[in-house]
Amino acid sequence: MKILLATTNKGKINEIKELLADLDLEILTLIDDFPSLKLPEEGVLSFRFNALGKAGFAAINTGIMAVADDSGLEVEALVGQPGIRSARYARVGATDDENNTKLLKVLKDIPEGQRRARFRCVIGTAQPSGRDERGFEGTLYGTITTAPRGEGGFGYDPIFEIPETGKTLAEMTAQEKNEISHRGEALLELKEYLKELLNEA
C-alpha cells in the first residue's frame, strides 16, 4: 500500500518513516516523489484543520492516500503561543535557531517554575476520494529551558525539557524521543489505523 507524507520537513519525514518501518508500506514524499506539488498555506483555525487540509489537498492532487501533520508548541505563560504559528514565530521562513532565540528572549523574565509548555501534534489522513478523513492527536508536557541543549531533533527540541528525565528532546536518542513525543503518540494511533487498512487489503 502506498502512502504519501505531505510535508517537506525532513525531521518529520524521518520520524514518521522510522515508526512505520515495520509495516508493509511504500512511503512516498513530496521531496522525492512530488517536488512540484506545493501545499496550501496553513490557516489559523487549529492544528486539526491544517493537518486535514494538507492531507486532503495532497491526496486529491496525487491520487494517493496522504498523511500530514500540524504541530506546535504552546507555552502556558504566553497563553498558548506560539501555537499554530510555531514554525514562523520569529518570521515567515524562520530557521529553528531564530524561533528558539525569539522564544527565549520573550521568556527571559519568566522564572523557572512558570515556564511550563506542551507540544501538540495532529496527524491527518485523507483518501483521494476526499472521504474518510481521520485525525490522530498527541500531547507532550515539559518546560522551556533558559538556553538550548543537545544536538539532536529539530524545531524547539533543544529548549524543551522533560522534567522527569532532566533532558531536552535534543539530548535524547531518536528512540527515546519517539517513545514519549507528541508526534510519536499520534503516530502510534495512525499506525493502528494503517494496520487495519493493510489487513483489509
Image: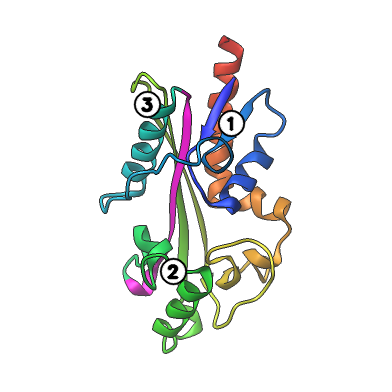
Q: Nearer the viewer, residue 150 or 179?
A: 150
Left or right of 42 on screen, residue 31: right
Q: Earlier in the sequence, mark 1 or mark 2?
A: 2
Q: Earlier in the sequence, mark 2 or mark 3?
A: 3
Mark 1 or 3: the one toward you: 3
Disc 2 residue type (three-letter): Ala
Residue 73: say if magenta. yes
Mark seen at residue 191: 1
Residue extending furthest toward the left: 45
Mark seen at residue 36: none
Q: CA distance from mark 1 to mark 3?
A: 22 Å
- SS for tag 1? helix
Left or right of 160 on screen, residue 132: left
Residue 71: say if magenta. yes
Is residue 106 among the parts visible in the rendering?
Answer: yes
**Residue located beneath label 3 in the image:** 60
Number of labels in the image equals: 3
Disc 3 residue type (three-letter): Ile
What residue appears at the point 41 percent right and 33 percent down from the top-left corner? 58
Residue 144 at x, y = what percent? 51, 74
Magenta stretch in the rendered image: 64-78
What residue appears at the point 34 percent right and 73 percent down from the top-left corner? 78
* Label 2 CA crowd tier, 10 Å (few <14, some 14–19, many 20+): some
Is residue 114 among the parts visible in the rendering?
Answer: no
* Label 1 CA crowd tier, 10 Å (few <14, some 14–19, many 20+): some
Q: CA distance from mark 2 to mark 3?
A: 29 Å
Residue 50 at x, y = what percent? 34, 45
Q: Are marks 2 and 3 in contact (CB under 8 Å)?
A: no
**Residue located beneath label 2 in the image:** 94
